[in-house]
Image: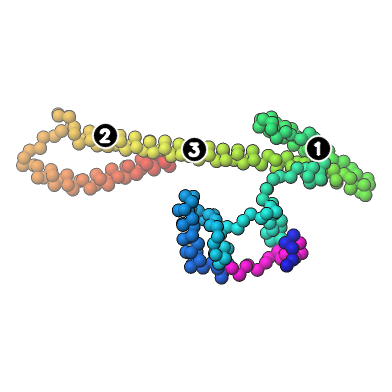
């Protein structure tokens, strides 16, 4: 078998392994779930899809999560990846570091100020070297190789500073997202309180109209006219209900519009 470390021996688009359709069956899935439940009951560990059951049959072994590679490296579509996904330093990449390195244990505020200062210096150096490159190309184009190497070194240093600041950028983006979510929740809560107060005032006003004080807004109805008044009220009630609903929706539209 060819070595996995030889890029020429591994196809960038390999065929899927045969066990994907031969061993990932409903019967095997049910069997591995039974073993996982038994293992969780015996050990007291919470049951999860990533649970690994020891000593399973060979037909069920591919249904379990694989062990991490012993070398810490694996290949995907011809590219090698590492388990420890750490940013390599400029020295490890063989690039000359411009300026003093920023200590990792420095305070966040001081580190931020240092990186901003370093990026500003590198930006000015980049513009200056670009002008020098333009002058060299105008006089002696063959002698521009060294200046191009200087520009490449400056770009590598700027890119390294930006990559080192990714964790801070992630934290700031998360803080901004949570603040926006909190502000949106507060606005929705405030709007709900306003609607509740408006509805409560409307209900209080309807109760006041229904239970008017004696002698104020009350008309005495004669016995002979009670039937006619009740019939008239029944005819007017649906119209008043529709009008009240229209007024309520109009108030809500005006409030949230």
As drawn, is 18 to the left or to the right of 115? Answer: left
Question: Residue 197 occupies which quadrant of the picture?
Answer: top left
Give the label, 3 or 2, closer to the camera: 3
What is the x, y in percent for residue 124?
Answer: 79, 36
Question: Residue 164 occupies which quadrant of the picture?
Answer: top right
Helix, strand or loop at mark 2: helix
What is the x, y in percent for residue 24?
Answer: 54, 66
**Residue 69 showing in the rendered view:** yes
Q: Decide: marks 3, 2 in contact (CB < 8 A)?
A: no
Q: Which residue is mark 1?
A: 98
Question: What's the distance in space between the residues labelled 3 and 2, CA to CA?
Answer: 33 Å
For residue 204, which numbered disc appears in the image? Answer: 2
The quadrant of the picture occupied by the N terminus is bottom right
Magenta region: 6-19
Q: Measuring 8% from the left and 42% from the top, which residue is drawn there? A: 225
Q: Decide: marks 1, 2 in contact (CB < 8 A)?
A: no
**Within-10-Å neighbours for mark 2: few <14, some 14–19, many 20+:** few
Camera-nearest residue between 243 and 200 = 200
Q: Measuring 13% from the left and 34% from the top, which residue is drawn there? A: 219
For residue 182, which numbered disc appears in the image? Answer: 3
Helix, strand or loop at mark 3: helix
Let me know if residue 127 is in the magenta part: no
Of callouts 3 and 1, the N-terminal one = 1
What is the x, y in percent for residue 147?
Answer: 87, 44
Q: Decide: marks 3, 1 in contact (CB < 8 A)?
A: no
Question: What's the distance in space between the residues labelled 1 and 2, CA to CA?
Answer: 74 Å
Q: Measuring 39% from the left and 43% from the top, which residue is drawn there? A: 253
Of callouts 1 and 2, the N-terminal one = 1
Let me know if residue 12 is in the magenta part: yes
Q: Principal SS element in the magenta part? A: loop
Q: Measuring 83% from the left and 38% from the top, which residue is drawn there? A: 128
Question: What's the distance in space between the residues labelled 3 and 1, CA to CA?
Answer: 42 Å
């Amino acid at each position: 078998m060819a070595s996995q470390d030889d890029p020429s021996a591994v196809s960038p688009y390999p065929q899927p392994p045969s066990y994907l359709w031969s061993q990932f069956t409903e019967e095997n899935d049910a069997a591995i779930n039974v073993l996982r439940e038994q293992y969780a009951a015996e050990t007291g560990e919470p049951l999860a899809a990533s649970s690994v059951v020891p000593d399973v049959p060979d037909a069920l072994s591919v249904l379990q999560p694989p062990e991490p590679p012993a070398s810490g490296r694996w290949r995907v579509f011809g590219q090698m990846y590492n388990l420890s996904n750490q940013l390599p330093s400029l020295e490890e990449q063989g690039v000359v570091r411009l300026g003093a390195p920023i200590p990792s244990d420095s305070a966040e505020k001081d580190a931020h100020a240092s990186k901003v200062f370093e990026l500003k210096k590198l930006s000015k150096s980049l513009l200056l070297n670009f002008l020098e490159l333009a002058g060299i190309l105008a006089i002696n184009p063959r002698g521009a190789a060294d200046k191009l190497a200087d520009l490449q070194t400056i770009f590598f240093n700027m890119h390294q500073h930006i990559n080192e600041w990714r964790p801070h950028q992630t934290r700031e983006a998360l803080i901004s997202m949570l603040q926006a979510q909190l502000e949106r929740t507060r606005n929705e809560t405030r709007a709900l309180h306003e609607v509740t107060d408006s509805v409560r005032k409307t209900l209080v006003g309807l109760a006041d109209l229904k239970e008017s004080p004696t002698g104020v807004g009350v008309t005495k109805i004669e016995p002979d006219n009670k039937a006619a008044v009740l019939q008239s009220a029944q005819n007017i009630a649906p119209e008043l209900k529709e009008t009240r609903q229209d007024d309520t929706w109009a108030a809500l539209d005006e409030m949230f519009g």
